[in-house]
Amino acid sequence: MPSQDSMEPTFSLPIGLPLSSSHSVPLPFPMSHGTTTLAFIFQGGVLAAADTRSSCSGLVACPAAQKILPIHSHLVGTTSGTSADCALWKRILARELRLYQLRHGRRLSTGGAAKLLSHMLQPFKGTELCVAATLCGWDGGEMDDNQMTDVENSASLNLEKAKTQCLSTAVGGQQCFGRERSGPSLYYVCSDGTRLKGTLFSVGSGSPYAYSVLDQGVQWGLTVQEAVSIAREAVFRATYRDAYSGNCVDLYHITSKGWTRRNREDLKEEYYREKERQSGDSQRIMVKDFKGKAFRRMGGEFTAHSLALCRKVQSKSLQLGVKGVDCQSTSRY
Amino acid sequence: MLSTQAFADNGKMKDYHYTGPVEHRFSPYAFNGGTVLAVAGEDFAIVASDTRLSEGYSIHSRDSPKCYKLTDTTVIGCSGFHGDCLTLTKIIDARLKMYKHSNNKTMTSGAVAAMLSTILYSRRFFPYYVYNIIGGLDEEGRGAVYSFDPVGSYQRDTYKAGGSASAMLQPLLDNQIGFKNMEGVQHVPLTQEKATQLVKDVFISAAERDVYTGDALRLCIVTKEGIKEETISLRKD
């Protein structure tokens, strides 16, 4: 029976990996799924954003879940899929990375962490385990602080140079081995075995909506402010359209000095701000005949266009002999 | 009484006919009902549960409370499948004893929560069908509530309802304790008396609308003086 692990005394490893049973038991309860998370690299580091709604087939199990989990000082992981799987596997990953750091005297790179997670999840391929995470980190130098600042300086100023250096030595073969690329790094790891390196990822049920906003605005040269506002906008648009995403947005920014977390923002405020902006801009334009009956109403954001169109209608109707057509613009209808 | 969902929309009785052989597999799970609730205050925590144990259309017991005392500062409420609730609480008690014997101190609420998460996840592919909520005091003496899903995902909250009537109670708690979706209201901190009264009212409402909740309410109030238990009777129909 699988549960003997939980009876072991505490001096051994606290818990082994969950043992997968040969047949699957039909579960009487639904598990939590559905989210929007995104991450991208820009000149100021890596930015990770996620919504905070944890849904359980129709019920919002938790409106204030944490979907971005810090793994260590320079690595953060966004989680998507089943929340229990993501939380526990991130915890196991954090433990393994810490052991690596203690044994080898340096932090494992983001790519290495991604590979480790991918290999740990491989035995569970085909089961109902569902983890889709993006690992966002800054690969630095040694654990030693003095050396760290040197590497950080060179990393932040000469990212491109470092890349080309590594490439040029790759041609030579042996020399590139063991030299780590330093700088921001982003990997996508999925429990079906996918492991991808990239500069922009969005994961979850709301990701199509987030991708559209991100593809429009993300580029290398963004300032931190701009990047933050794009990330927030992307999550906001996704929560607007996707039923399984919502509530608040969490933002984490990873630089050479580690990760910093912005205050969680409730998107309800953003929604009301947007509504106010819309009702302020748009003016309802009514075209009425002399008896006061409205036969054309146009409104929306292209106010000037609508007004011009109305004037055309007015002049045309005068030409056709319809009298008393009036073109009014009202701010609220 | 059968609920009206058994009848088709236009009021006629549903047609029963032979659909062919249907395989009925043995299900290792059963649903025994029950609702659990926990609220954390400044220096107290309340864990409350009803005491009805039901299965299908029958009531097995009217006096089966779902709160279990773990330590002097921690109480756990478990609802769902009663067999798994019993086994899980036995395992937690054993682990608490082992911790006490090897570390010479009692487990804190946060530590119990983290341990429960790993216990639940070790059965990821044949889960404990239990909805757990832990209520207690943290190391600084402030109230803490940890809510779990059946496979071990957890987080710290101020209030949480779990079990069969959770979908009815959680919005009410969001409004009354979290002051959500209200404009122009002063956010006053929750006193112990107000919290106790609120919990009683909330369970009375749950018993009205949820068939699996009722009979009696067991309240465990955790303060630094200890754990006080109260029993209030609810609807028995």
Image (cartoon, helix red, strand yellow):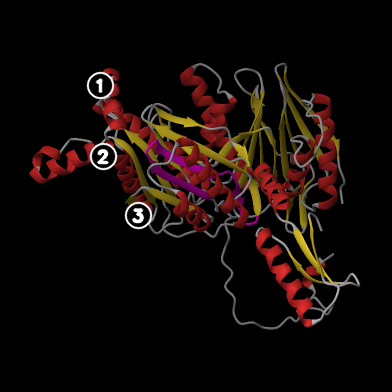
Q: Position of residue B7 (x, y in %)?
A: 80, 74
Residue on which disc 1 sits: A147
The amino acid type, in three-letter code, at marker 2 is Glu
Report helix, strand or loop for mark 2: helix
Residue B164 in sight here: no
Which residue is painted at 49% across and 49% down in the image?
A: A80
Q: Earlier in the sequence, mark 3 or mark 1?
A: 1
Q: Which residues are magenta?
A: A36-58
Task: Name the one closer to the observer, B152 or A179.
Answer: A179
Which of the two marks, 3 or 1, is nearer to us in this view? 1
Q: Residues within 10 Å of mark 2 (few under 14, many from 20)?
A: few
List x then y, in percent, for residue A261.
Answer: 50, 32
N-terminal label among 1 and 2: 1
Looking at the image, residue B112 sits to the left or right of residue A123; the answer is right
Q: Are marks 1 and 2 on the same chain?
A: yes
The residue labelled by disc 2 is A160
Q: Chain of mark 2?
A: A
**Taking A251 as reference, is A243 above or below it?**
below
Q: Looking at the picture, how far across and down is residue A145, in whole percent?
A: 30, 19
User: Is residue A222 shown left or right of residue A142?
Assistant: right
Question: Where residue B30 sits: x, y (%)?
Answer: 64, 55
**Where is B101 relative to B128, above or below?**
above
Residue under numbered circle 3: A194
